[in-house]
Amino acid sequence: MTEISDILFKKLESEFILNRDQLAPIVNGFLNEFQIGLKTPSKGLATMIPSFVTQLPTGNETGTFMSLDLGGTNLRITAVQLLGDGHVKVLEVKHSPTKELKTGPGELFFDWIADAVEELITVKARHLFQPDQVSGKETLALGVCWSFPVDQTEVNRGTILRMGKGFTLQNTEGRDLATMFHEAFERKGLNVKVSAILNDTVGTLVAHAYTNPRSRIGLIFATGVNAAYPEKVENIIKLDQQVRDKYPAGTEMLLNTEIDIFGNEDYLPLTSYDITMDKSHNQPKFQLYEKMMSGAYLGELTRLIAMDFIKNDALFKGQIPEGFDEPWSFPTMYMSALERDVTSTRQVSLEKILGKYHFEQQPSLEDIAILTRICRIVSTRSALLCSCAIAALIEQQGLVTKSNADIIVGMNGSTYEFYPFMEERLHRALRQWFGVEISDRIRLEITSDGGSVGGALIAMLCC
């Protein structure tokens, strides 16, 4: 490794490998934002959004319930058979809406959804339901994971807001979401009731609680990041007093933190690379924390750093490969592949990753080692920043001092699950914050099908 690259790496590591003192302002900043969010009404761009879900499953529940998960691309209707002892059986119907459906009358869109629900009940998962549920004599409960803005007023009520993601449904904005579902179900002769409207992070926490009833945090660490946790209703000041008074003292309600929009220049350790990437984004100064650490952005940060190394003659002999100078041309999956490729020849890296670009001279093994080391530094900071969210959620609940029991975190998402070494880096980051004794109590456990299983469980809990 050359003297120039050595200097560049020392500077990079000083900016990216954060110690405990550098993490403290982030954790404290998040704790402060929790308090602000608990008081600020959930209108527009909001944090700490009440779910109106005040129960977690025990793991012993049984029965078949349904969930619906609508995102920007796919509709998933799922039948979840709860078998008890934390076990489930899952079957789903998956469809993608056409452009005509996404821009046409709202009634037609909800009728299309109702047809998919009928397909699940009467064909795909018929054997999971009771005969009276299939025939319509018995009402089926549905949990709806609606990945669009909704002004939620109760666990199963919410006003549809402007949708985005290519959806411009006619005659839907300002209408109650559950009502539009129920009208479509009635038109199709289905006895299905929306029992709950939920966020996928709340679903992750509930789904993991069925597997492990001691779960206290649900965290999605994927293309984006978000978290949910239970908060005492009396602390959720944004809820009107008469709403809070409905709940017995000590009742906890699950909150969608929207932690992805936490953080600002005052306490986030932004580097020149973060600032450059943010300026090139179509939403500058928005989601600064998420841009520093989630899967959507790690590849671009790595590319910007690598470009710096190239311009300083410390990588690829100072020559920019054709295509590498294009913004967002180096996705996070390339980082993952580089870190996973530990063969002595690095042929995988050369052919499958760097083969995407045109080089005047083939990259050397040292070039690949330098690029991989950049990936490692960027992904290590990602784990450190993720640990700040978990640490703040643990401290907000006082879990360290409440008991000596293990602290259970339900984890979901591609960046955590599939990026090599991310799990151990996150454990190491938590150890840096809490020390060995406490961090050994923190259990990061994978949650599968958070939106679908969680949606069905919430539908069950809210029946």
Image (cartoon, rainbow, N blue to C red):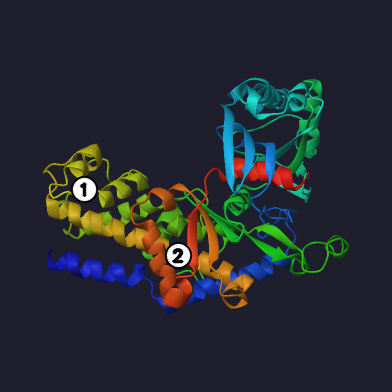
The image quadrant where one finds the C terminus is top right
Q: Position of residue 93 (x, y in %)?
A: 59, 27
Q: How many discs mark residues in the rendered view? A: 2
Residue at disc 2, secondary structure: helix
Q: Position of residue 150 (x, y in %)?
A: 72, 45
Vertical placement of residue 310 versus 385, above or below: above
Examine the image and state in which quarter residue 52 appears: bottom right
Residue at disc 1, secondary structure: loop
Examine the image and state in which quarter residue 293 appears: bottom left
Of residues 291 and 404, the one nearer the viewer is: 404
**Residue extending farthest right:** 242
Q: Position of residue 5 (x, y in %)?
A: 18, 64
The disc placed on residue 253 is: none
Query: Can you identify the residue that label 1 sits on?
Result: 320
- How far apart are the two marked residues, 2 and 1, measured between alpha carbons? 30 Å
The image quadrant where one finds the N terminus is bottom left
The amino acid type of the residue labelled 2 equals Leu
Query: Can you identify the residue that label 2 sits on?
Result: 385
Q: Position of residue 378 (x, y in %)?
A: 34, 60
The residue at the point 39 percent across, 75 percent down is 19
The amino acid type of the residue labelled 1 equals Ile
Q: Is residue 242 rendered to the left or right of residue 215?
A: right
Q: Is residue 377 visible?
A: yes
Of residues 148 and 83, the one nearer the viewer is: 83
Tell which circle, 2 or 1, labels the residue nearer the N-terminal end.
1
Q: Residues within 10 Å of mark 1 (few under 14, many from 20)?
A: some
Q: Is residue 87 rendered to the left or right of residue 4?
A: right
Front: mark 2 or 1: 2
The residue at the point 70 percent across, 46 percent down is 458
Vertical placement of residue 140 versus 237, above or below: above
Q: Is residue 160 visible?
A: no
